[in-house]
Amino acid sequence: MAKLKTIEELQKDVDEYISQFKEGYFSPLAMLARLTEELGELAREVNHYYGEKPKKSTEKEKTVEEELGDLLFVLICFANALNINLEEAHERVMEKFRTRDANRWTKIEEEKNGKSN
């Protein structure tokens, strides 16, 4: 099994791939359109596997995993094009959820030493 990569390593991999082409990254608006397109493809696959819309016999077999991978690639391209470090962005978002939303949801009680936290 291949070593799992950090988000930083994923961003570097994508940048090395894109950097070999003269065209480089798409514009932010084009990137948003691509992200939306990939999200639609993911929605279609989820609907085929978990929803009420079966796939047509003429449609190519794809998986939710494949579509999530496509979405991740475009998201990384978007972040790279705008010089956004996704690890830092993730940490800021998690801090927001830890503080702002600390008591918003019902937590699963953990038993420790016979007590609930």
Image: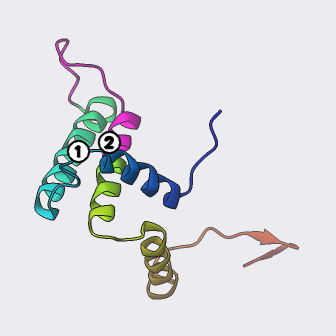
Where, by quadrant of the figure, is residue 68 drawn?
top left
Above or below, 27 relative to 85:
above
Instruction: Tell me the residue that label 2 is attached to.
Output: 70
Residue stretch rendered in magenta on the structure = 53-71
Above or below, 19 relative to 81:
above
Residue under the image location 48 percent in, 69 percent down: 87
Residue under the image location 50 percent in, 61 percent down: 8
Instruction: Tell me the residue that label 1 is attached to.
Output: 38
Residue under the image location 12 percent in, 56 percent down: 30
Front-most of residues 87 and 95: 87
Q: Is residue 8 left or right of residue 58?
A: right
Q: Are marks 2 and 1 in contact (CB under 8 Å)?
A: yes
Report x, y in % for residue 94.
49, 76
Q: Is residue 110 left or right of residue 96?
A: right
Q: Residue furthest bottom?
A: 99
The C terminus: image quadrant: bottom right
Q: Earlier in the sequence, mark 2 or mark 1?
A: 1
Residue under the image location 14 percent in, 60 percent down: 27
Q: How is the protein colored in the picture?
A: rainbow
Where, by quadrant of the figure, is residue 21 drawn?
top left
Report x, y in % for residue 62.
31, 26
Question: Which element type, helix, strand or loop, lies under badge 1?
Answer: helix
Label at residue 19: none
Q: Is residue 48 left or right of residue 87?
A: left
**Three-letter amino acid code of the residue under disc 1:** Glu
Question: Which element type, helix, strand or loop, lies under badge 2?
Answer: helix
